[in-house]
Every structure is written in structure tokens, then in C-alpha cells.
Amino acid sequence: MRPVWRVADVRAAEAALMAELPPGTLMQRAAAGLARRCALLLADRGGVYAAPVLLLVGSGDNGGDTLYAGARLAQRGAAVSALLLTPGRAHAEGLAALRAAGGRVVDRPPAVVDLVLDGIVGIGGHGGLRETAEQLAASLLRHHGRDGARATVVAVDVPSGVVVDTGAVPLTASGRPNAVRADVTVAFGALKPALAVGPAAALAGQVELVDIGLEPCLRGAPALRVVEWSDVAQWWPRLGAASEKYTRGVVGVATGSARYPGAAVLSVGGALAGPTGLVRYAGGARDEVVHQHPSVIATSRVADAGRVQAWVCGSGLGTDDRAATELRTVLAAPVPVVLDADALTLLVDGSLADQLRRRDAPIVVTPHDREFTRLCGEEPGGDRVAATLRLAAWMNAVVLLKGDRTVIGTPDGRAYVNPTGTPALATGGTGDVLAGLLGSLLAAGLPAARAAAAAAYVHGLAGREAARSGPVSAADVAVALRPVLSGLP
């Protein structure tokens, strides 16, 4: 997993490292990495020589990084122009280096621009962009290069205007993001939350981390961690020569109803794609489930389902007295449970919430934003990680807060984010598939947080895989899980 660090931790690490190095070394390392990435981008647009490059330069070290990178590009023959947003406060040494390399300072952007470097505000910024910077950020989409294509925007460390520690993005009076939208962000030394979570992550584009020697100086716990494929492959249960259906785990699925049989079919499909050896279904969609998935053992009630190692409950279950009884029976079982959709609505009932908090076995809840609001009485807000962790602590459960960058929080304060989300999953029933897959991982013995992180990761990949063929349905996602999972050991 890749650690993500708060601004205060990064600042402290930078100070510790700079105390050990000659003055300016850290900035030169950052500028070298930034210039290298920019040169690679320009190579795809006709080469560095004579390429028109625009630097948007604010005050402070972020502007210095940008100016020194611009100087390196100018030394390679690029036509570099710098637009200084605060001319009297520009980094003096960086500006001198740019001019010495042949770069120039301009009052307005040139007519043709291949590459724009966003060095307006770094990790010390807050509150969105000032008016002039906002206008410049909005105009970036209108710049075009020598090839007629839109100029490539590279953010220096973070896109200017985002809330770095939370990933929130302030809005303009017209409702637009008051921040730069980058194609690429070159981050220095450490990932920051705005590059991994919240609406800011979507503005960062492709993120490249440049090693400037900061890692040994980072102290304490990271704000969150980004899950990677290597983590999922390491965690995923493996078959052995002695494996059989019961030792692989049995997952119970209490979802769907006569009114919503599709939820049952989809959640069972997600469970079957996972690593367990047997799926038991309990609910009002028994006939439809067996018709679609003949390997499933089905009954009408949770009480009659038999022994399982984990339960999935909620999708399409309904919110009537019968559904509440089924949920109570699931919560009474001394095994891990996944609670989704209607089960979350039922938890608003105080007695069920009390039963939930009294459980000793692991719990994973999987709300989207509206369900989160019903549970908490307030929206997740701009700090999705903090909101997830508050709910996890209150419920004594692992919380999987769905979204473009799904956040997983644990009761003891650990947070993970999934980078594989895709808008293709924004369709009915895909959450049912995710819940079934997650239950299968719990039944196979994975700890709750790892199961949630792994399920979210491969579910996102399945959404991307399904989208290759056009518009996506939840059934497509369930099918796409199999080729995705075939890549695991």
C-alpha cells in the first residue's frame, strides 16, 4: 500500500531533510523530477526543442520548483514563458535561473502552448484560488499547442486550489471547481490526501511521485493508504491440495425478495466469483437464485440456512417486519457480516443499532452518501476520510464509503482508499455484486478491513473491464469479475 501524508507531516519531514543537505538541494531534486516528466510529455507532442511552455508561477517554494523546472526545459531548447501571479514575491533565484536559461516573463499567455505548469499554489494553499488565478485556471482549457490539441496541464505537487489535507474542492459562485484541473500531477516526496481521495483526486489526473529523499524523514502514521494490486494479490486466499468446499469457507446471502429478486441474483453472483467454496442463500428470491445459480443451496429464511462463516444482508431485502427479523437473525450469528442497502436503512431503528454495537464478530457496512447521511444525520462533507472514521468508531464496524474513490475506515482509526473506481459502476445493482464479493472474502477468512479493500479494488477493475464493451449493467460487472480474478495467484 502507498502511504498518503498530511501537510504537517510533509513539512516536518522536509525541514528535517533540509537540515542535512546543502541549501536548495531539495528544490533542485524536485525541479529535476518535474522537468523530466514534462520533457516526456513534450516528446509525445513533437519534442522539447522549440516547444511552447507556459509557467503559471505563484509565490513561495512551489513557484520556485516551477521556475527551476522551466529553466531546465529552456536549457533543452523549449520556448518557456513565465506568467508571475505575484511578481514582487516570485522566487528570486528560480526567476534568475529561468532568465539565464533563455526563458522570459510575460504579461499574458502566448497564443500557442503545448504544456502548462501549474505552480500557482502548493501544499500551503487554502480556500481556493484568488480571482486572477481562478480566471487563469478556467482559461487553461482554451490553450492549444502546435499540433492543435489542447495544452497539457501539469500540476506542481498538487493542483492549485484544492484542500490538500482532505481532497475537498472549493466551488466558484457559479458552482465550478475553484481549482486547476490537471492532466498530470508531479508530486514531490510523498502523496498527499488531495491526490488520492475526494473530488480533488479527479482534478489531479495521472499522479507521478518523484523521490526527493523524503521517505526516511516521514514520522508517525500516514493519513491513509492507497491499496495496490500487489496488496490484493498477497491477501487473496489461495487453494491448496487439501482444499474442499467447506474449508474454503461458506458464505450466507440474505438479500433480495419477491419484489426485488435481481438483488439476490446479483449479490449471489458476486459471492460465487469470490474465493469461498459454497454459497447458501436465504430469502424470498429463492427460486430465481437457484434458476440462475444452480450450485447455490437455497432456503426461505436465515434461521434455516445452516452453518456459514459470514453473512451478507440487505440488498433488496425490504424494510418491513420480515426483513427486520431476518436482519436480527443475521446479527445474532457469531460470524462476520456485511450490511448493505436496506439493512442500513433498518439500522436507523435504535434497537437494531444497539444489537449491532453489542456484536463481537466483525461488521462491514457499505453505505453510499445518502445512506451515510441516514445513518449519521449529516452528509460526509468535504473530509470523506474523517467522516468514514467517525462512523466506523461509532458503529464499531469497518465502513466502506462508496464513491469514485471509495474510502475504507476502521474503528481503530486506519483508513484506506481504493483507486480503481469508475463512473461505469454508477448503475443499479453494482453495489449488490460488491457486497456478495466482500462476504465471500470474509467467509474465506480475510480480516474485515482487508476484505473490504480487496473487494473494492477488484470490483473497480471489473467495472473498467465491463466498460470496454460499452454501457455497463450490474450483471456485466459480475461476469467481468472472473477475468479480473484470473490474474490473481
Image: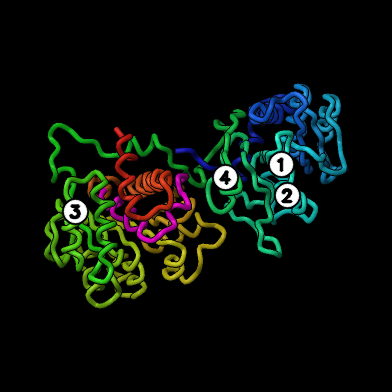
Left or right: 255, with 67 as reference point: left
C-beta proximity under 8 Å, tags 2 and 4: no
Front in this rendered view, residue 71 or 356: 71
Q: Is residue 19 magenta?
A: no
Of pointers 1 and 2, the one earlier in the residue sequence: 1
> Residue 96 in the image: x percent, y percent?
85, 29
Q: Image quadrant of residue 349?
A: bottom left
Which badge, 4 or 1, comes first in the chain's sequence? Answer: 1
Query: Farthest residue toward the bottom?
Result: 321
User: What residue would you read off at disc 4?
Assistant: 195
Q: What residue does disc 1 label?
A: 118
| C-alpha gap between disc 4 and disc 1 | 15 Å
Q: Secondary structure at mark 4?
A: helix
Residue 453 visible in rendering: no
On screen, residue 73 above or below 111:
above
Name the N-terminal-most of marks 3 and 2.
Answer: 2
Quadrant that contains the C terminus:
top left
The amino acid type, in three-letter code, at marker 1 is: Asp
Q: Which region of the structure is painted magenta?
A: 418-440
Q: Circle 1: is it few (<14), some (14-19), or many (20+) Cα within 10 Å?
A: many
- Residue 439, given in percent of the width and then of the height, sits at 27, 53
Give the mark toward the camera: 4 or 1. Answer: 1
Q: Kindly indicate the quadrant of the structure image that contains residue 344.
A: bottom left
Q: Which mark is residue 137?
A: 2
Judging depth in this view, the residue of 356 and 167 nearest the camera is 167
Left or right of 355 on screen, residue 400: right
Where is residue 211 shown, x and y percent of the image?
A: 59, 29
